[in-house]
Image: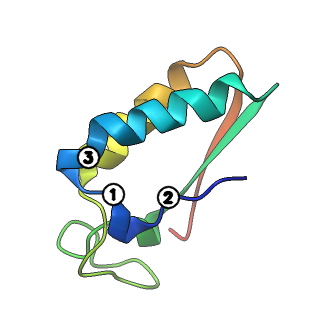
Amino acid sequence: ARYILEEDMHEEQIDNIISSLHTFMEQQDYLMLTLCTDVLNAAFAPGVSAPSPFGLTPMVVRTLIRIVAANKKTLSFDICEV
């Protein structure tokens, strides 16, 4: 597994993040996507179990979900911490 920390995921760096994501997906046989809602900025998701004032915007999250969900290797997608 590889990690990109929330604090390193700025909208102005989305192209680099997407490139890293594509590289990672190409190296895998199968993909499973989990969205932990705690990663969302508290301004957009104040009711999560661990609100983060510096979390990701819905636009960044949507972009990443669309990329992974569109990949033919993706087997599942779940949402947790709701």
Circle 3 residues within 10 Å: few <14, some 14–19, many ≥20 = few
Find numbered disc 1 in the image and state the secondary structure of the residue it sits on.
Answer: loop
Contact flag, marks 2 and 1 (Cβ < 8 Å)? yes
The correct choice, above or below, for 49 with respect to 27 in the image is below
**Which residue is tagged 3?**
13
Residue 79 position, x and y percent, is: 56, 54
Give 9 or 44, whichever is nearer the viewer: 9
Which residue is at a point 82% across and 25% down the rendered structure image? Answer: 29
Circle 1 residues within 10 Å: few <14, some 14–19, many ≥20 = some
Earlier in the chain: of badge 2 and badge 1, it is 2
Circle 2 residues within 10 Å: few <14, some 14–19, many ≥20 = few
Which residue is at a point 46% across and 83% down the rendered structure image? Answer: 49
Q: 40 left or right of 70?
A: left
Give the numbered dot on residue 4: 2
Find numbered disc 3 in the image and state the secondary structure of the residue it sits on.
Answer: helix
Task: Place residue 56 in its image quadrant.
Answer: bottom left
Specify the amino acid type for callout 1. Answer: Met
User: Most extreme residue toward the right, as rendered?
Assistant: 29
Find numbered disc 2 in the image and state the secondary structure of the residue it sits on.
Answer: loop
**Which residue is tagged 1?**
9
Which residue is at a point 17% across and 73% down the rendered structure image? Answer: 43
* Structure colour scheme: rainbow
Residue 10 position, x and y percent, is: 24, 56
Contact flag, marks 1 and 3 (Cβ < 8 Å)? yes
Q: 14 left or right of 30?
A: left
Earlier in the chain: of badge 3 and badge 2, it is 2
Give 68 or 15, whichever is nearer the viewer: 15
Residue 9 position, x and y percent, is: 33, 57
Which residue is at a point 53% across and 27% down the rendered structure image? Answer: 22
Specify the amino acid type for callout 3. Answer: Gln
Task: Place residue 42 in its image quadrant.
Answer: bottom left
User: Most extreme residue toward the top, as rendered?
Assistant: 72
